[in-house]
Amino acid sequence: MADMTERRIHLRTCPLCEAMCGLEIAVEDGQVALIRPDRDDVWSKGFICPKGTTLGHLHHDPDRLRAPMVRDGETWREVTWAEAFDRCADLLHPVIEQHGIGAVTAYVGNPTAHNFSLGRYVGVLIGMSGIPMIYSAGTVDQWPKNVSSQLLYGSMWVIPVPDVPRTDFVVVMGANPHASQGSLLACPDVLGELDAIRERGGTVIVVDPRRTGTVDHADEWIPITPGTDAALLMAVVHVLFADGLVDLGTLSNLVTGVDALSELAKEWTPEAVETTTGVPAERIRRLAHELAAVERGVVYGRIGLCNQEFGTLASWLVDVVNMLTRHFDVPGGLMFPKPVAWSTASLPRPDHDVAPPFARWRSRVRGAPEVLGQVPISCLAEEIATPGEGRIRALITVAGNPVISAPDAGRLDEALPQLDCMISIDNWLNETTRHAHVILPGLSALEQPHYDELIWSFAVRSAARWSPPVFPPGDDRPAEWEILIRLALICAGQRPGPGDVAAVDDGFFDALVLSQGLDPATVRANYRDGGPERILDLSIRTGPWGDRYGEVPDGLTLTKVQEAEHGIDFGPMPAGRLPEVLRTADAKVNVAPAYITDDLPRLRARLDRANGHLVLVSRRDVRSNNSWMHNVRVLVKGKDRCTLQINPKDAAECGVVDGSVVRVASEAGSVDVAAEVTDAIKLGVVCLPHGWGHDKVGTRMSVARERPGVNNNLLAPGHFVDAISGNAAVNGIPVTVAPVSSR
Ligand code: SF4
């Protein structure tokens, strides 16, 4: 073990978001002394944000759980790992024996996608346990994009990303890189790239109900009515066809459905949508012409387009507009990344090929149709609380805090105590895990290696960088992948030992080897240990630059990646990848899939509906990451950021003054919060930040409790979803605002 008293520098990738910044971490006396950017990192080249400097705070946080916890009534106690897993079996086995595995479900949170072992092994829990249905954060923030990709390209994870570094014209819709960097887009320093576009004479346009920080890096802000982006984009499509601007470029032999789309777009004139969208018809028309004229241009749509009433239509139309203007699969447009190591999520899904993954079954209580194997997260509360055959009685949460981050959060908070068994894999006793019977803490980010699993599938360049652990975990601490396997085996009726975990890991690895057309026994002979490092080596060696276990001389291996401490760069996204990534039956892209276009009448009906007086949208902040960074004092100090932003005219009409406490109410609930009167928000729209509301009794988040903020998801009605994806519509919620008192 290293001498803990000397100052050592560790290089690693920040695991918090899709920017994947390279960090230089100075450790002294066993403590993180300083974190600064690694200027030699081949990928991020010295970029970092405030969150990246706080990994030491997260690691040293006294509230972070280091040992398993068991709850007896209201009392928590630390237990050994053996006792914790025994308690899990004691709780789960009777539920399964009496009610079947259908009474068990899991919720998978967003950090899973950024974790070295959770990301690679969560599928083992889901697949091996026999749990028939899970819930995830995906139905809050990205399901429409997955649906769109499933129908356009034949795979929910084949998602094209904007080639921001090489474009000259970008339209940013429903995304705010100022707060979140890229999303379904891995690109270090997105704002720097936007500045570079303008420096080389290009144009940046932001379409958003808020004048976000990203607008400071743009040429133009187009304020839009929340939830109407699809109408705007349909009008752009209309103009492209009506004015003879459609040019498929290199896609002409790969695309079908263009005539059908042209027919559908006929009624969507800019004039028909301008009142609803709030965007003048002339500006829509000009936008279509600008996109058609520019050599290298792209439309980028993200979370604000997904978590709204017409999320799938909007997400689909982003890709369609790029295709119709030849900004697709070419430099500067929407392109398909080429990761060095493939993701387990990218492997073919036979169940999606056998039957279209839509409405194969319905949820028990509200009858919500399944979409890509899931129903809206807002169904979970009623599936727990509604008596009857098929009721959910046991829940496993994996790195998630849905009591804060899911819509209709109040109902879920009330439902969770009704579970017979709740087990949480989590590092904090938070608003959700306080309901658990057992908490199984994973390693801190600095106690485990890192190499992103899924995120490189959204990267604007192909690169590879290995991060060894900074601190050794305690001897008896299992990694998350071992916890997941143990829980899967417990669900299967066992009380597993270490040998059982290794056997499952070997079986999983063999299946992955087979997926690459190799012999499992031969490949397994290369390794002494299992776990995610072995999978990573496999996915590098069978990836596009890999050595295929000796077949390709000088090919890449994990060892070679580990030897390059600042990483290895393999260049920008290559053009012309569409035929290679397409998984549709006819090897073509149908730009007008009926499942999506059948939803156009619903959007058309929206045009006949008056815009509400006030609608609520959510916002993110550069110092926040959903709900789980609010226990880091340096990130939450200073001015209160949990405020209701309201336009001055709306404020005057509601009798609200800046700084006063107001009550925001929707059909789902109400919260009292300080008003922030600002012209940075469109008339008729109010905005709360996402991820707050740390005022619950029974948590162990001492810093977060000092500045709890309010939970915007208490205002999100569970039934308000994008009808064809089931994604929560947390933007565009009708609300009222009224003064409560003066400060
Ligand atoms: S942008 Fe910030 S949070 Fe994201 S990877 Fe970089 S340092 Fe980490």
Image (cartoon, helix red, strand yellow):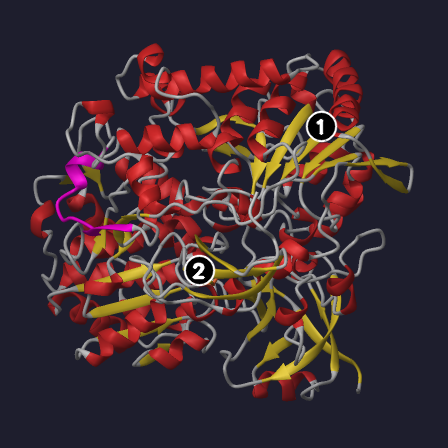
- Mark 2–mark 1 distance (CA, rounded to whole Å): 43 Å
Residue at 31% in and 40% down: 158
Label 1: which secondary element: loop
Labels 2 and 1: the sequence-earlier one? 2
Q: Going by the image, does 537 lie left or right of 58?
A: left
Taking 544 as reference, is 716 above or below it? below
Relative placement, left or right, of 546 versus 12 is: left
**In the rendered image, which residue does mark 2 sit on?**
23
Q: Is there any visible trace of residue 341 in the rendered image?
A: no
Q: What's drawn in magenta, residue-wise? A: 568-582
> What's the amino acid at mark 1?
Ile
Residue beneath the point at 35% across and 55% down: 186
Q: Is residue 319 left or right of residue 413?
A: left
Which corner quadrant holds the N terminus? top right
**Foreground mark, 2 or 1?**
2
Residue 710 sits in which quadrant?
bottom right
Give the residue at x 41% y 59%.
Answer: 21
Does label 2 point to a residue whose CB lies under 8 Å from ligand 1? yes
Tag 2's secondary structure?
A: strand
The residue singled out by tag 1 in the image is 392
Q: Residues within 10 Å of mark 2 (few under 14, many from 20)?
A: many
Q: Tell me the tag on residue 168.
A: none
Q: Position of residue 696 (x, y in %)?
A: 81, 56
Residue 313 in the image: above or below residue 485: below
Q: Please, is residue 6 above or below residue 622 in the view?
A: above
Q: Residues within 10 Å of mark 1 (few under 14, many from 20)?
A: many
Q: Based on the picture, tell me whether residue 192 belongs to the magenta stretch.
A: no
For badge 2, the amino acid type reads Leu
Residue 518 appears in the figure = yes
Where in the figure is residue 627, as x and y percent of width and height?
63, 57
Q: Nearer the viewer, residue 359 or 110?
A: 110
Q: How far across and how far down the image is residue 732, in percent?
A: 54, 63
